[in-house]
Image (cartoon, rainbow, N blue to C red):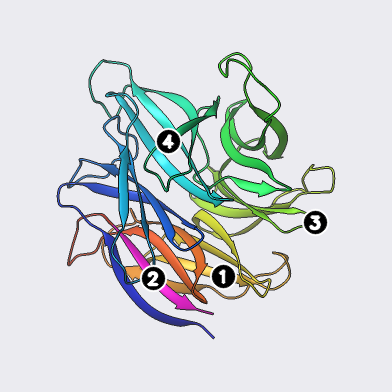
């Protein structure tokens, strides 16, 4: 049985476009990150003015205790930040676009790949953890398998996009630009004529589970696809699930898996979830966490377990308040 307990606005600022949130559970607090851009009344997903905000709070109804804003150089914008917490360290990943014109732009830009940062003081200061070459990066956090950091990205390959898995090699010392610490581990998925994007990875213990957003021009919209890793970290052939974008995976204490995602194909546009009780082999019916009466430009949920409840964050707008903002839903299943 699903119970929607409450909704709340986590962050709203007039004149700012807030989007693409990520949520992580710390030792005694929650960490939230999202992209923030000065664009009040327009949709902007690639913008050299954008930065990201990182903040913390201790409960669903609490206000922020700390926040900091990160920006690359003046004409380089941060896109799709994701956050993870492991052994007292915050890990932040995002990809960046830089201007080709020497001024702020949303069109003439160059993709500079994935950047990874870390913080041991709850986000007050940040260290550099290297980068991954590629056109675009996944809006999913680093995961840890036997203490090894893994990060899934998606990038162009022979005219389409593929999902790849990288690992962090702590034994390498030297110039990151010529001797990267992030190394290729395996090709998760890729097929001719299809673009595998936004891979969401979950560590199941004996294997990894991955959900992809796949765009097929023959279909005309995005569909979620699924596959699992084998023992040698090769991957099973991916198979389609249902319409959706921006998948996110979360494991419940009882072993069930929560897949949250966004439905943008037809009205009502909505933030959704489904539950699997068998490691992602089958899924339950769609759970609608929230519907909007305005634009499909919303969603990108991130879900965590906190205080025996689920908290899902996403970006949002509606007819009552068209300002794009970060909202959260507290629920149980």
Determine the residue located farthest toward the left in the rendered image.
14
* Distance between mark 3 and mark 4 Cα atoms: 33 Å
Provide the residue designation for mark 1: 274
Residue 220 appearing in the image: no
**Which label lies toward us, 3 or 4?**
4
Report which residue position mark 4 lands on: 126
Nearest the eye: 316 or 329:
329
Left or right, 73 with respect to 313, comes to left
Locate residue 207, reporting x and y percent. Answer: 77, 54
Q: Which residue is mark 3?
A: 206
Magenta residues, start to end: 326-333
> Where residue 329 is drawn, which disc sits there?
2
Return the disc, 1 or 2, that comes first in the chain's sequence. 1
Tell me which numbered mark, 1 or 4, is placed earlier along the sequence: 4
Q: Residues within 10 Å of mark 1 (few under 14, many from 20)?
A: some
- CB atoms of marks 3 and 2 within 8 Å: no
Query: How far apart are labels 1 and 4 at the CA level?
Result: 35 Å
């Amino acid at each position: 049985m699903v119970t929607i307990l409450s909704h709340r606005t986590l962050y709203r600022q007039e004149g700012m476009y807030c989007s693409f949130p990520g949520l992580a559970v710390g030792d005694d607090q929650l960490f939230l990150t999202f992209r923030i851009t000065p664009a009040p009344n327009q949709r902007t997903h690639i913008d050299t003015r954008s930065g990201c905000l990182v903040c913390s709070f201790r409960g669903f109804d609490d206000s922020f205790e700390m926040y900091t804003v990160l920006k690359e150089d003046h004409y380089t914008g941060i896109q799709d930040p994701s956050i993870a917490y492991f052994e007292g360290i915050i890990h932040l990943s995002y990809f960046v676009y830089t201007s080709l014109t020497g001024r702020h732009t949303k069109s003439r830009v160059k993709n500079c790949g994935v950047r990874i940062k870390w913080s041991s003081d709850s986000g007050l200061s940040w260290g550099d953890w290297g980068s991954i070459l590629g056109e675009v990066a996944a809006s999913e956090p680093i995961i840890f398998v036997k203490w090894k950091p893994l990060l899934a990205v998606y990038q162009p390959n022979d005219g389409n996009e593929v999902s790849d898995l990288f690992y962090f090699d702590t034994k390498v010392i030297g110039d990151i630009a010529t001797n990267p610490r992030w190394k290729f581990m395996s090709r998760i998925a890729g097929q001719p004529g299809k673009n595998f994007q936004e891979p969401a990875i979950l560590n199941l213990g004996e294997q990894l589970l991955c959900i992809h957003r796949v765009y097929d021009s023959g279909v005309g919209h995005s569909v979620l696809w699924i596959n699992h890793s084998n023992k040698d970290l090769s991957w099973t052939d991916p198979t389609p699930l249902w319409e959706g974008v921006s998948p996110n995976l979360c494991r419940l204490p009882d072993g069930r898996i929560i897949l949250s995602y966004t439905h943008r194909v037809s009205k009502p546009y909505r933030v959704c979830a489904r539950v699997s009780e068998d490691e992602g082999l089958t899924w339950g019916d769609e759970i609608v966490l929230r519907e909007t009466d305005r634009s499909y430009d919303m969603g990108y949920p991130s879900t965590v377990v906190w205080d025996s409840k689920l908290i899902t964050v996403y970006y949002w707008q509606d007819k009552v308040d068209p300002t794009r903002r970060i909202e959260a839903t507290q629920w149980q299943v």
